[in-house]
Structures are given as C-alpha cells and as structure tokens.
Image (cartoon, rainbow, N blue to C red):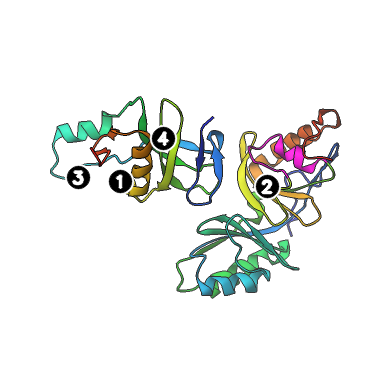
Amino acid sequence: MLILECPYCGVKAEETELASGGEAHLKRFGPGSDDEQFHDYLFMRENPKGVHFERWRHANGCGKWFHAARCTMTMEVFGTYAAQAYEPPQEIKDKITAKRPGWSWREFSDASE
Amino acid sequence: MSNPVTATNGAQFAGMATVADAGLQGMITLRGDLSSKVLAAAVKAATGAKVPAQRKIETSESGAAAWMSPDELLLLVPYEAAVATTAELAEALKGEHALTANVSDARSFFTISGEGARETLAKISPVDLSPEAFAPGDFRRSRTAQVAAAFWLEADGSLRLVCFRSVGAYMFNLLSNAAHPQSAVGVYQG
C-alpha cells in the first residue's frame, strides 16, 4: 500500500484516499512548436524501474493536487511537494541522491555526478 | 411553505454504537484566505468560533468552524439562520478574494455515539481513530467505503459525520452495518 503525505493538509494518506494524476513535470509546448514536440508531450512517458515523479490528488481529502517522488521498485517514498513546482525542490533531490546515487529522470539527475 | 426534511428523515440504528440522523444543520462553505483578519472576523461573527488550525474544528455555543483544506472552511450554523448568515458573510467579505455558499440542503449529517463509535467509523475509513491519534476537536476529511466524508470528535466522545446528501441513505446503511452488534472487533476499547 502506497502512503503519501499530503503537503497541504499534512495527512499521511493511503492510496485509496488519493487519485493518481500520472507523470509529473510534463511540459506542454505552445505556439510555434513542431509536431514532434507535441507528439512527445502527448504520448512519451517515462516507465522507470526506480526513481519516479508523479502527480497525485488528495481526492478524498482536501482535494489539492501535489507532486510525489518515489521508487517504483521498492515503493519507497522520497517526499511530496507542492503542485506549483516546475521541478523537484533541492531538498527532495538531495534525499534521492542520498538513497539512489547516480539517479536520473528526464532532465533531472544526481547533481554530484 | 415547504417542509424541509433530511435524506434519512430521523433514522436511527442501535448496535455496538448508536447511529442517528443528526437532523437539519445549517452548513456554509467558505473559501478564501484563511490567514486574513477580515475573514477571521467574519467567521467569528457568523459562528462565534475562531478560524480553526489545520485539521481542527472550533466550536462555540451557536456554531462551529471546521478546517476543510488550506483555503476552505465549513461553517456550522443553525439551519434556520443559514440563508441569512451566508448573505451576511458575503457582505462582510466584500473586497476579499472569498466565496460563500449555503450547502445546508446538499449535505447529510450523522451522529455516531456510544462505546463502539470509534470502531464503527474505523471499519469503513482508512484513518487512525485511536484515542491517541484522534482527539476531541480533531477534524478529518477522508473516505468511508465508497464515498467521501468529513468527521470530527465531540468532547463527549461521540462522532459527527458529514457527507453529500445524495449518498445520505447509503451512508446510514453503511454505518448501521458497521455498527451491527455481532460485528464487534473490540479494537479501541478497554
């Protein structure tokens, strides 16, 4: 059972209280972008074994969206952070680096590498 | 004039806990900046209670204010006063980025009292309801079986639960089933 702490109401919410929102930090390319970029935005998704970033909504609770960083293999949760973030906060990245040296996910990776 | 009734119209069930329709209750949804002084004053005027802290409910003699999310409160007022209080709130919050709505007739309200109250609710909700984790004044929005609900603990140890009116009958049956006398697990007691 996945347990995530909602950063807005501080509840350690289990999976049934939450709704999954798919992959985090997707960038939608605006006017002037080419078909390739729009195709990637629509269809290309990460499917990692290990560190992953996702969007979740505290649906049966405060109703807010938030981000979560977790490991898909061990179900370990590295942390949750606000939905308004364009990238994972440094503190979350540091936590992942401490536990999974050399990690990388899309454009984010272990900064010490 | 119309004669307002609740979805379960005074239904009661006595088992390991007593589940009862809590009757008509005025409820107002208030969204806005909870740190605002204007909002705090308006809440005080409407309910007599102050703005609650995260996941808490503040009660007063005439009403209560409950924390629903970082920008939302649920205000409890007498049913007859709900329409007028909603208008007064909207007036008091003029100029603020806030929104009020009278949701009294969109909600069902239940009491769960007696020895097995905590256990009854714990069976259908993924929330730690042990006395150490959930004390009087604590407020929680969560899931009860298949529907969303909000509940809190009164000082006398009974629980109050709010859900959508459309699932009011479902909620009563669900709670009654969980409170069935032969279904006692004995957790949180003794």
Q: Which numbered dot is residue A87?
A: 1
Label 3 Cα neighbours within 10 Å, binned few <14 / some 14-19 / many ≥20? few
Have a look at marks 4 and 2 and say if they share a chain: no
Q: Return the chain for callout 4.
A: A
Q: Quadrant of the N terminus of chain A?
A: top right
Amino acid type for the residue under numbered disc 3: Gly
Q: Which residues are magenta?
A: B116-130
Residue B88 at x, y = what percent?
59, 72
| Earlier sequence position, callout 3 versus callout 1 | 3
What's the CA distance linking mark 4 and mark 2?
26 Å
Residue A29 at x, y = what percent?
20, 42
Label 1 Cα neighbours within 10 Å, binned few <14 / some 14-19 / many ≥20? some
In-image side of B49 versus A22 (left or right): right
Vertical side of B58 occupied by B19: above or below? above
Vertical side of A73 occupied by A97: above or below? below
In-image side of B29 versus B6 (left or right): left
Q: Return the chain for callout 1.
A: A
Q: Which residue is mark 3?
A: A30
Q: Which residue is mark 2?
A: B133
Q: Which residue is mark 4?
A: A70
Q: Is residue B119 magenta?
A: yes
Amino acid type for the residue under numbered disc 4: Arg
Q: Quadrant of the C terminus of chain A?
A: top left
